[in-house]
Amino acid sequence: MTPFRVACALIVGAYLGAAPFLRYAHLGAELVPHGDHAARHGGELVMVGDHHLELVRRGDAIEAFVSDAVRRPVRPLRAEASFDGGDPIPLHWVDRRLRTEARPSRTLRLTIELADGARLAWTFEGCGPAGVPGSSAGAAAAPPFPTGRRPAAS
């Protein structure tokens, strides 16, 4: 038997011996769709369809972070906020987040249009005096908006 055949036999044997255990390899939560439901920016995280939406209060502004199923940031085509059912106010894209001035309100509805044509809508309820949510609930949205849902507790 030549040294080449011995080396090949050892490599194939090692692979076949390890193959059944490869399915238990940890690929990291960032590669598993919906494997990470932690609020990364200190806000309130909800799911709308296959997307994650996190709302955060920073000073006198609100910020919304939109990400896909594996938490990669998504830049929307357009987005708007409506405080207590009032007129929609545009949110502006600044440094990988949507941002607008906070207003006193009890509810805040975000409507977001993505480049792939998906439209996301979520109503945050129980907002404090500065328009920041204390709790939220998905609102039944008129088509074509999908209804949001809270992530399962981990």
Image (spheres, grey):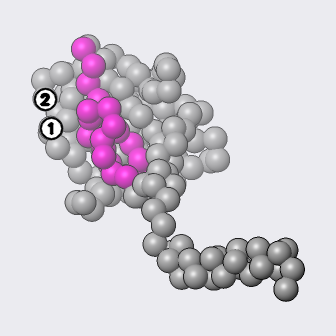
* SS label for mark 2: loop
Residue 58's x, y, as percent? 27, 19
89 or 56, which is in the foreground? Answer: 56
15 or 141, which is in the foreground? Answer: 15
Separation of disc 1 and disc 2 at Cα?
A: 7 Å
Position of the N terminus, as image quadrant, is bottom right
Residue 43's x, y, as percent? 26, 35
Can residue 58 be found in the magenta stretch? yes
Of the image marks 1 and 2, the number of the one nearer the N terminus: 2
Residue 133's x, y, as percent? 20, 35
64 or 124, which is in the foreground? Answer: 64
* Mark 2 lies on residue: 128
> Does 83 sit above or below residue 126?
above
Label drawn at residue 32: none
* Mark 1 lies on residue: 134
Q: Residue at x 50, y 77 (%)?
A: 21
> Does 16 sit above or below residue 11?
below
- Residue segment shown in magenta: 36-59
- The answer to whether marks 1 and 2 mark residues whose Cβ atoms lie closer than 8 Å is yes
Q: Residue at x 41, y 22 (%)?
A: 99
Q: Quadrant of residue 66?
A: top left
Work out whether residue 45 can be spotted: yes
| Crowd around label 2: few <14 · some 14–19 · many ≥20 (10 Å) | some
Question: For the residue marked with disc 1, what is the amino acid?
Answer: Gly
> Does 80 sit above or below residue 30?
above
Q: Residue at x 52, y 42 (%)?
A: 72
Q: Quadrant of residue 16?
A: bottom right
Question: For the residue marked with disc 2, what is the amino acid?
Answer: Gly
62 or 147, which is in the foreground? Answer: 62
Residue 11's x, y, as percent? 70, 74
Q: Quadrant of residue 49?
A: bottom left
